[in-house]
Image: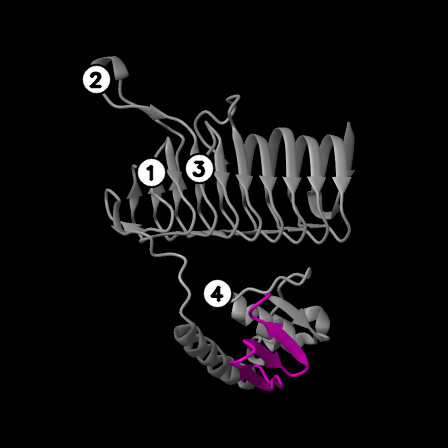
Amino acid sequence: MQIHRFENGSYIIAETLKLGHNVHVGPHTTIRATECVIGDDVTIGAHNTFLVGQRLEIGALTSIGNHNTLTARTIKLGEYVFWDSHVTVGHGGKFSPGAHLTVGSYSMICARITLNTNHRIDIGEYVGIGEDVAIWTHGSFLPILEGFPADFGPVSIGHHVWLPARTTILPNRRIGNNVVVGTNSLINKDLPDGCLAGGVPVKVLRENVYPQANPARNSQLVQQVLAEYTEMAVYKDLHAELSYNETRHTITCNAVVFDLNTMKTQGTFTRTEEDFRDYMRRRGIKFYTGKPFASVLPQEYTHLLYTPDDF
């Protein structure tokens, strides 16, 4: 058994432990797992509790917020996962043999989400789950021998899915790839690939909608993003020379080229280009460079973060 202690009351207890480079664990976080693998450049915030009976795996460049409670037999988070705060993995039946959770790379788990791992939950890549979403794999309370309903079973979510705030998914449901769901929906049936769905209970509103390429629309969206960031750069006192080559489908920010065909970049980044990359991420144009996303804090906030020791 390996025990690694960090400052401010944080520790990891594991029989097998592999830590990558530049791993940061915030104060008062405890990680207990039979096997624990944490990749490079992972950040775990404060007051988190992990209890994983078998294997905990956190991919490189994943960021986990504060006050999360995660209990399951296995938990696997891919690379570049953004995991916010006050998320609960577990709830009823969390010590069952089927308590497994996987979250694919480039996904986002927002605040105050419930992931009930009585049965396994599989979440694909590029999945966004909004605040106050609940995913249940078991549901019963009243006596089933008196005819009251009960349902138990896994939940599967495909790739490129958006589940916005206050959506609820019931047990034994599958959501396909390239699906967008409306806010406040109750998903009590399977959803096919490429659909737009919403409602209580959920209905498929349009079929075979996503993905779709519209060059004219895309060009307009890129121009809009550049115009908005020009204003943002002035606000942050950053120098950003922006241009868009519609023929080559590339964006240039100072000396860095962002290729929208390959989603690759070329050039040397400063904090300005990193701030622009993070701004595009928030607008839905995501370039993954092997480095964490980083934005520049406006000066009017920066000076408020001084402590008495700085004076």
Name the mark nearer the viewer: 2 or 1. Answer: 1
Residue, disc 3: 156
Left or right of residue 154: residue 57: right
Q: Earlier in the sequence, mark 2 or mark 3?
A: 2
Q: Nearer the viewer, residue 203 or 152?
A: 203
Q: Earlier in the sequence, mark 2 or mark 4?
A: 2
Residue, disc 2: 147
Q: Earlier in the sequence, mark 1 or mark 4?
A: 1
**Res. 238 image quadrant:** bottom right
Residue, disc 4: 284
Q: Are marks 3 and 1 in contact (CB under 8 Å)?
A: no
Residue 296 appears in view: no
Classify the position of the C terminus by image quarter. bottom right
Q: Which mark is residue 282?
A: none
Q: Amino acid at mark 3?
A: Ser
| Residue 155 spot, x, y in % from top left | 42, 35
Q: Nearer the viewer, residue 298 or 36?
A: 36
Q: Indicate the secondary structure of the residue bearing disc 1.
A: loop
| Residue 35 spot, x, y in % from top left | 70, 31
Q: Which mark is residue 190?
A: 1
Q: Amino acid at mark 1?
A: Asp
Q: How is the image coloured?
A: one colour
| Residue 115 spot, x, y in % from top left | 45, 38
Q: Is residue 65 above or below residue 238?
A: above
Q: Is residue 253 magenta?
A: yes
